[in-house]
């Protein structure tokens, strides 16, 4: 089945450690996105990527890093510089970039819940 | 400044009644898209409805309709005949294009509670 997969579902990190969240899609989508969601809050954009080997900072990129070496994959690293990393992280992808598909939605993964212990 | 504003943190409605969730947006781009997503307690994001900035008619999808008022920059979601399963968080989002690509920006959401 086509879709977007995030792993792991739950992740625990010790203070001062880097941790990488996985996001893979087999929808042949060009655009991919990472969001952070805090309890009772909306989704805030961390990074996004329109094409391979290119990505852009969103509203809250500090303390995070990404790579886009393959079209299917957009991993997010939460670095030790992120002071308050405990949150729910959502990855999304879309086919936007091709005019005739601009009326389609973005697809989301199931999310990764990161907790700092 | 917020690009997507949802002013209702929580809304309460009884089963079978209609409810309107408000959303206003801010953009100077003539081409944009507006989306509504539902997020149940499980955390998954469920796409509900889309409205393009050039669409002449308001979008409808089953019990969901979008009241699009372009001049007021508002895109309110109307849910008719509410069901218990509609209890969830609802997000308004805008697709905006820039030189770097296409970003999807979300509001802070509205929690809808449907009671019997």
Image (cartoon, rainbow, N blue to C red):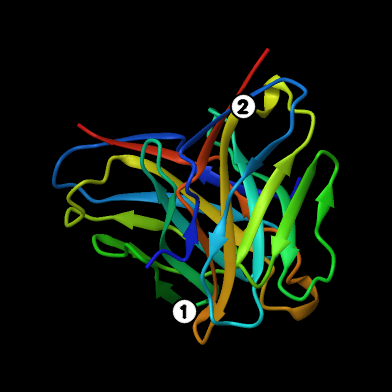
Residue B82 in the image: above or below residue B68: above
Per the rendering, the mark at residue B20 is none
Residue A92 % position (x, y):
56, 55
Q: Residues within 10 Å of mark 2 (few under 14, many from 20)?
A: many
In the picture, the quarter occupied by the N terminus of chain A is top right
Same chain shared by disc 2 and disc 1: no
Residue A84 in the image: above or below residue B93: above
Task: Tell me the subunit letter for badge 1.
Answer: A
**Occupied quadrant, residue A95:** bottom right
Residue occupying the point 18% across, 38% down: A14
Task: Tell me the subunit letter for badge 2.
Answer: B
Residue occupying the point 44% across, 58% down: A75
Left or right of A57, for residue B55: right
CA separation in Å, label 2 and label 1: 39 Å
Residue ranking furthest to the bottom: B99
Q: Which residue is mark 1?
A: A54
Residue ranking furthest to the left: A16
Q: Residues within 10 Å of mark 1 (few under 14, many from 20)?
A: some
Q: Is residue B31 visible?
A: yes
Q: Is residue A71 visible?
A: no
Residue B20 in the image: above or below residue B33: above
Badge 1 marks a residue whose secondary structure is strand
Per the rendering, the mark at residue B87 is 2
Left or right of B50, for residue B112: left
Residue B114 in the image: above or below residue A78: above
**Which sits in the foreground, B92 or A79?**
B92
């Amino acid at each position: 089945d086509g879709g977007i997969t995030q792993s792991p579902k739950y992740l625990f990190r010790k203070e001062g450690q880097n941790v990488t969240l996985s996001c893979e899609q087999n929808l042949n989508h060009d655009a991919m996105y990472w969001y952070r969601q805090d309890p009772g809050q909306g989704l805030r954009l961390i990074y996004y990527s329109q094409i391979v080997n290119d990505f852009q900072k969103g509203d809250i990129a500090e303390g995070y890093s990404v790579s886009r070496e393959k079209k299917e994959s957009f991993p997010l690293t939460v670095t030790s510089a992120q002071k308050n990393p405990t949150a729910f992280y959502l990855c999304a992808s879309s086919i936007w970039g091709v005019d005739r598909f601009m009326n389609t939605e973005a697809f989301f993964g199931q999310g990764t819940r990161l907790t700092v212990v | 400044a917020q690009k997507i504003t949802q002013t209702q943190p929580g809304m309460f409605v009884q089963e079978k009644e209609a409810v309107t969730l408000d959303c206003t947006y801010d953009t100077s781009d003539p081409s944009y898209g507006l989306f509504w997503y539902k997020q149940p307690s499980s955390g998954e994001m469920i796409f509900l409805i889309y409205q393009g900035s050039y669409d002449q008619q308001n979008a409808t999808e089953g019990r969901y309709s979008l009241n699009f008022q372009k001049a007021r920059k508002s895109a309110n979601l109307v849910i008719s005949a509410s069901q218990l399963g509609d209890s969830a968080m609802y997000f308004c989002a805008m697709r905006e294009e820039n030189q770097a690509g296409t970003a999807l920006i979300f509001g802070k959401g509205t929690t809808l509670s449907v009671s019997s």
